[in-house]
Image (cartoon, rainbow, N blue to C red):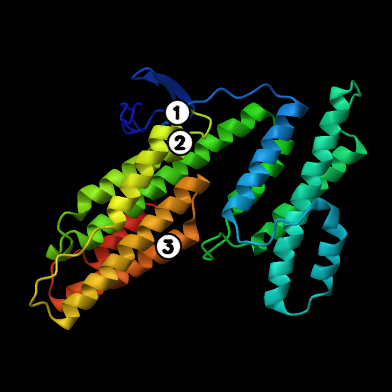
Amino acid sequence: MNTENPTAASATTDTPNGTLDTIDGVRRVYYDGYWLKVYDPPLDSLKTKKTLIQALTRRLFNHVEHGINIPGKRLNDARRAYESETDPARKRVKGAMLAGALFNRATDIFTKLVELQELGIEIDTDNALMRECGFCLQEALELGKLVLHRSGEEGIDELWGEPFRAFSIPVEAFYDSRYIKIAQALRDIDLIATVIISTLTTSALFHGLEPLVAAFAHIAKIKCETLRTDPDIFDVWSEFVVASEKLGAFAPHLSPSSNPAEQQLATDGLRLILQGRDLVTDITRARVTMPKSACEYIERCMRYAELVRGSGSATLAGSTLQSIVARRF
């Protein structure tokens, strides 16, 4: 398995997005500063789209809050429950359940249409059921704004949009759009790793942390660009899990004479490490950015940096962290 950095190839700021090259025997495509592993898209057909939409729908439910994977046959029940609810908090959850039912209804319709096509029945793109499938996906996309990621911190709009895009555009164009989103995810993985290192590693409490963060971010980016069907996934996923475990096992270097203030800084810093690791994991698995969660995490790092600076310990000041973040947000 080649575990070189996806950005290892030389590129200039003039390198246009979509540039293809072979690097160390691996075909890669350039997007927004990253050379990403290229996968050949399958043939564009209704059967391919059915498989793709089913996979994207399963992937969606794997990353969002529990309890919203409602069967498509219960769509009318879900809609009545949502429309009759008056409590705002419960209405949000019921809206998420309705979104799930809409996605499953769309998948049900598309599956049957493909089965008819396989029997030799021509299915026109203007077919009434095709239109109904599109309407279901579009409404689900709108309601998807109510759905939270499984972490509870935010929704991931991009995941809700993918099945609709897969339905609406050619398969090859859909694959191309995924490279853009993966490059954006890699950029945020790099940013979060930089923030963790800059916030914590100038303190003696966290001596030895930097190589663990760097190794975790490195394999996270490789995992993010590697499809589950890739033969390398067995090595990539195992390395990713091990790097995550090593980072999670890091212990701050507290002396026996440490005072309560130092102990609290160590505890708070360790919490930031684990939160950052979990955020990178969520981004890596979803293969899209999580801007709200990233912003909130970085703000916590800024507050920690100011606390440490106020205590007299050496660390990166919040203003410096802001300059790092400004390049992203």
Lateral position of residue 12 relative to residue 137, left or right: left
* Residue that protrudes farthest toward the left in the picture: 257
Asked if marks 2 and 3 touch (Cβ < 8 Å), the reply is no
User: Identity of the amino acid at label 1?
Assistant: Lys
Element assignment for label 1:
strand
Q: Where is residue 304 in the image (x, y as percent from the top left)?
A: 28, 71
Residue positioned 89% across, 23% down in the render: 119
Q: Mark 1 points at which residue?
A: 37
Q: In this view, does 252 lie above or below 3?
A: below
What's the amino acid at mark 3?
Answer: Cys
Q: Where is residue 225 in the image (x, y as percent from the top left)?
A: 45, 36
Q: Which of 223 and 292 is in front in this view?
A: 223
Identify the image quadrant of the N terminus.
top left
Q: Nearer the viewer, mark 3 or mark 1?
A: 1
Contact between labelled residues 2 and 1, with CB atoms less than 8 Å apart: yes
- Give the alpha-carbon distance from disc 3 to disc 1, as whole Å: 28 Å
Q: Where residue 261 appears, x then y in whole percent?
A: 18, 80
Residue at the (36%, 56%) spot, across then down:
277
Q: What element carries label 2?
A: helix
Please state which amino acid type lies under the numbered disc 2.
Glu
What residue do we see at 50% from left, 44% from top? Answer: 287
Return the mark for residue 225. Answer: 2
- The image position of residue 240, as x and y in percent, is 37, 43
The residue beneath circle 3 is 295
Mark 2 to mark 3: distance in Å?
Answer: 23 Å
